[in-house]
Image (spheres, rainbow, N blue to C red):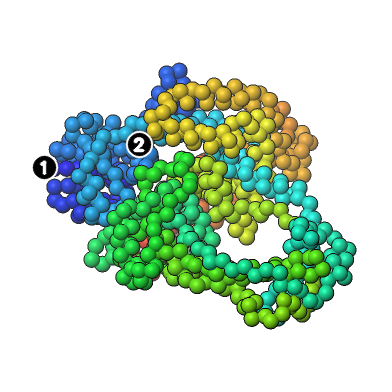
Amino acid sequence: MKNLVIVESPSKSKTIEKYLGQDYKVLSSKGHIRDLATTGKFGLGVDLEDKFKPNYILMKGKSKLVSELKKEASSSDNVILATDPDREGEAISWHLKETLGLKDDNYGRVVFNEITEPAIKEAFKSPRKIDMQLVHSQESRRILDRIIGFRLSRLMQSKTDGKSAGRVQSVALKIIVDREREIEAFVPEQYFTIEADFKDFKAELKKYQGKDIEIKSKVEADEILNKLSNAFNIENVEKKLKNKQSKLPFTTSTLTQMASNRLNYPASKTMMIAQKLYEGINIGSETVGLISYMRTDSIRLSDLFVNDTKKYIAANYGKEYVGYAKTSKKTENVQDAHEAIRPTSINRTPESIKKYLSPEEYKLYSLIYIRTLSSLMADAKVEATTVDLENKGYLFKANGQVYVFDGYLKVYKDYEDTEDAILPDFANYKSKVIICNKIDKFEHFTEPKPRFTEAKLIAELERLGIGRPSTYAKIISVLKERKYVTIKDKKFYPTDTGIKVTDKLQEFFSSLINVHYTASMEEDLDKIAEGNLVWYELLDKFYKDFEPLLNVAFKEMQKDAPEETGEICPECGKPLVIRKGKYGKFTACSNYPECKYIKKEEKQIIEICDCPKCGHKIIEKKTKKGKIFYGCNNYPKCTYALWDKPTGEVCPKCGELIVEKKDKKYCPNCDKDTKKK
């Protein structure tokens, strides 16, 4: 029997084919093959009058691939759709089924959380049919994003310098802008602390006559200091043995946060590396996926992995280090069919495969491996000591802790601050009185909440229920690309454009572009996936709320005044301003349309080499759409042109200019690659 298996990524197709054997041929769809058309009302590709029926078309460049898949499918006895184990993957499988014309009796859908031989073979034992509830959830998200993206973006482009707006993107931007305004409005308040410095430790003033104390001024602090003596009464010494729990295994959110903090990786880089580790790395004897699926919000670990890891811990660290699988209190919106991000084998230590990984892959794999291993190790044990010291009715406290059992910190100590803070043994003090060396006051000022880093923004989005594991990196990338934010010292600062776009959206769309509505929409998308909400009813309700607001905004939103250049129009004497056009910004008269003057920009001519046809110069040029090419400056008399940059060298075979692309030189006529020297 001939079986065709279709996966998303070409990089994992050969590995899976090897696992399945000669009866299986594995090909890749290279991601999505179809997307919404840009036809119909507003170019949405959706029939707004017929229950939001989507109009799908093949994506650009996918025709040849789809023809090949159709040919293979028609000659196969069975087709197995093995795209990623999430809603996006489910939708891709459905698009493949529809496009390839697969029937219910000759196709199956399989999902697996890791690309290892046991996991693949186990998944293929129990194929199922496509889950249309998951597909409708993904479709709804796509249609929502298309409606908001197309309609709001057009509004922003016509009224502001902004290039786009989005359902989640604009809320994330609002969070950054709101924080910036909190910081700008913050007024620091002065306060003081008082600290007693003893020979072996320090104690801080906490209470006066049993009540918490706040010291607001230097005068208050000095008054207290004048009352105190250097003799303190030991009121109470309390020792407690506390457990310090290990961290939960990684979700997408916590992995991107930790990689940002510890490795200085932006979220996009973390996810790119994680994708490679998931899809498979050649480790000498085999190509195997090193981690489980990296888009997840679950902290669950499979029973098989937990049992194997416990045995590993007992064998390598001792039975006393064996812990238990943690559970999370968070249950809302968690797709718990997934697992946490973990190594596919606990026996595949980072050091054992280091030589097969790039430095960046090794660092991220090590982070995932150590986090998962430590999550199943025993709690650390800390002896915490608190000492109360009394002086003239003022109570000072000193705290110390000593790790009496390292537990999970045996492997995780490099990722966590775990220093001992040792206090003296007060049981040895014969007197109940202890003398300090000095008592000082310290001035402080309250500080606003800090600006968001990538890690903190992702944590905030997750906390608020905005976005999903697959979207965090994309949200941040869009904000950067649109120049709505800049990054200084790893922190987000909203740009003037970002602030203007946010203010305009809040003026007209505050009921929709807000944290509560966006989080509620995510919950509704989950309900669709669970079969508890009809997808087109959700879209209908949204559209009836959205479209009237949009119509008002198009009519009433004030357009940003164009920026004046300080120059005067030579034709009518009015100020020149910077305007936006289809191909970028240009300088024109503010008196348009009465005056249609446009300033001709001086073009910088970049000469590359001599033209092989006429002897004039090959220069860098741009098409109307801004794409760079290289052509003769003797145009139109000489029409010689190239897309890739010429090196100035001439092909000895045909006399054509040799061009350079990426790391290779080649002749565009002979297509003969020559190594770059």
- Mark drawn on residue 1: 1
66 lies left or right of 22: right
Q: In screen coordinates, is 364 left or right of 559?
A: left
- Image quarter for residue 86? top left
> Nearest the camera: 631 or 215?
215
Q: Amino acid at mark 1?
A: Met
Helix, strand, or loop for circle 2? helix
Q: Where does residue 122 sit, x and y in percent of width and height?
A: 22, 49
* Residue wearing tag 2: 91
Q: How many marks?
A: 2
Quarter of image, res 676: bottom left
Residue at the spot x=80%, y=76% of the render? 230
Marking on residue 360: none
Give how far across and how far down residue 92 sits, in percent: 33, 38
- Where's residue 240, x and y in %? 56, 66
| Nearer-the-camera pick, 352 or 654 | 352
Assign the N terminus to one quadrant of the image. top left
x 70%, y 35%: residue: 560
Foreground residue, 345 or 662?
345
Q: Secondary structure at mark 1?
A: loop
Using a 10 Å C-alpha cutoff, classify the residue at mark 2 as few (fewer than 14 neighbours), some (14 to 19) or many (20 or more): many
N-terminal of the pair, mark 1 or mark 2, is: 1
Rounded to the nearest whole Å, what is the CA distance between mark 1 and mark 2?
27 Å
Question: Is 50 above or below relative to 168?
Answer: above
- Give the amino acid type for the residue marked by disc 2 in the picture: Ala
Task: Please give the name of the residue rendered at 23% of the width and 38% of the height, measured from the top-left corner.
Answer: 108
Quick check: can you spot residue 570? no
| Res 156 visible | yes
Q: Front-most of 88 and 603?
A: 88
Image quadrant occupied by the C terminus: bottom left
